[in-house]
Image (tube, coloured by chain):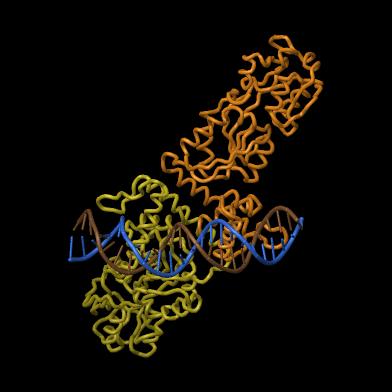
Chain colours: A orange, B yellow, C brown, D blue
Amino acid sequence: MTLKQLEAFYWAATLSSFSAASGRLNVTQSTLSKRVAELESSLGVSLFARSANRTILTEHGQLVLEKAQQMLVMEADIKSLHGGPQPLRGTCRFGISELTALTWFPKFVSRINELHPQLLLEPYVDLGSALEKKLMRGEIDFAILPKTSSGNTMLSTVALATLDFAWMASPRRIAAKDELTIEEIEQHPIIVMTSESRLTESFHQWSSQHNVTVRRVLACNSLSAIVGLTVADVGISFLPRRFLEPMVQQGKLSAFQSNPSLPAIEYCFRWRADDTRTLGPTLAQLALEEVDYSLTYGF
Amino acid sequence: MTLKQLEAFYWAATLSSFSAASGRLNVTQSTLSKRVAELESSLGVSLFARSANRTILTEHGQLVLEKAQQMLVMEADIKSLHGGPQPLRGTCRFGISELTALTWFPKFVSRINELHPQLLLEPYVDLGSALEKKLMRGEIDFAILPKTSSGNTMLSTVALATLDFAWMASPRRIAAKDELTIEEIEQHPIIVMTSESRLTESFHQWSSQHNVTVRRVLACNSLSAIVGLTVADVGISFLPRRFLEPMVQQGKLSAFQSNPSLPAIEYCFRWRADDTRTLGPTLAQLALEEVDYSLTYGF
DNA sequence: AGATGTTACGGGGTTCGTAAGCATC
DNA sequence: GATGCTTACGAACCCCGTAACATCT
């Protein structure tokens, strides 16, 4: 019985999949299968019901799972006892939203490479809901994404930044002013992200709450595309204010507050709470130091 | 970081000796040393103060020790979750008192060999105090010995039997009767075991409590020698009643109660409480089934 | 078919024990 | 010099990954 075996078993059990677990631990399916098999033979008990749909725990598996979980937590405890976090190594898969990708992501990667040169990064850009799913499935190690309204207790969370939103439009469409009323907003076609986006979700909440009847003309899953469409005056859109400040300064876009004001969205760094590696807390700290949702790359 | 490393570290720390720990785990000193070294390098911290008198924990070592202890307990938990205890293997060193060696020890060994054919036994016969010392030092895995008055919380204990004592004398010396008074006892020379013996310790307590002035003529560390001396009528002795019943039946010895009566002694099966292997409980159970302090071999 | 878990096998890495090397008492 | 820990090195073993196989959707 070894810690490797327990780790393999733990992730196979919680992810309900040997292959997912193998990906999670950066080993082949074969290796993971064997580690679990070894654990079973060492204990002399079947941990998974090996018949129809595999990867279902036996009764004994349930019991062992709890203990295994505790063992892994203790292992992490021991590792974290010693003072400074040593450089990370291996492969790290993580998810980020497009907004992050377009802003402070390059700086974040630079810092990671600088402090953890042995760590191979595999970032994956997608919408928040997809990222959260991947997180839960163990396909990525952490994600930087907007906070959900419903707190998920399976995920550890570090708040990074609160984003203020503003209405954005081409200067050709709307003359410079401070604020748009609901009536003014309703006169324009609105470009939004697809409904899977947290930004859109938050907007829908706002619009139904204030009885705003919007005329959506386009729902796109790409933030940069939306910016481009807005600059091209296809319609107006609600976008993070700080993100597009540079373009507003350049006169390519005008920004407006709205009345009632748009909701803010909180971005955060999340990882599976049962992931006992130091990777999560360590990189979360780094993210906190680098976070800045101002557009500095691209466009 | 592996469980083997933690185990090596744990025993090196608690036994304050690498060599003792290596004996305890049935590996060479070299192997144990390397396991600890690997653990240290994996944690990036020194666990032992490697200067003057080695095998002294560093501050960090203290912290890790606690966690390691818990890890090993959990490992044992997991192993014991599964139902039946599988056959034991490897080498088992243990200590027994001479009284045990002369009575049910052969049956005990037979049962062990039968149920655990892969287990190599290395029994060691000595007085209780020596056995307890060896136990604490980790030089033996368990011991069968008389209970101490002061309970040692470091040791797990399973009570095996309570021994009633009687005065034994050659029939030539004392005519058959039920009971000896203190005055009668004081008239005869008394043969005792050496003062390290628990039997003797218990007797001293009794004699001082009842103001018995004994005339000791011989203190020997061998129980069988004492029996022989008593049969040869060198003096009288106090011995476990059931042990010598066969010899009383044969007319070689006479047994007498005393007034006040001699204290009883409880024999028990003990092992280090922090020894998380199943060996202790398993063999204790076996001992319970076989225990019988009646003389059946020898003489 | 496609996805998922197991089995077979060869190569590489790890870990063990023997034996020699050091330090301390 | 004895004891106790570390280092060096060859050999056995373990463990990983590739690839073929089995099984269920």
Q: How many discs appear? A: 0
Q: Is A32 placed above or below A291 here?
A: below
The answer to whether residue B149 is visible is: no
Left or right of B211? Residue B76 is right
Q: Identify the image quadrant of residue B154.
A: bottom left
Horizontal and vertical percent position of residue A110? 51, 33
Horizontal and vertical percent position of residue B125? 34, 74
Out of A33 and A268, give the one closest to the viewer: A33
Left or right of B148? Residue A107 is right
Horizontal and vertical percent position of residue A165? 67, 21
Q: Identify the image quadrant of residue B90.
A: bottom left
* Residue at 53%, 69% in the rendered image: B86
Out of A125 and A177, give the one closest to the viewer: A125
Q: Is A285 placed above or below B162 here?
A: above
* Residue at 65%, 13% in the rendered image: A251
Q: Is B273 placed above or below B99 here?
A: above
Question: In the picture, which quadrant includes the C terminus of chain A?
Answer: top right
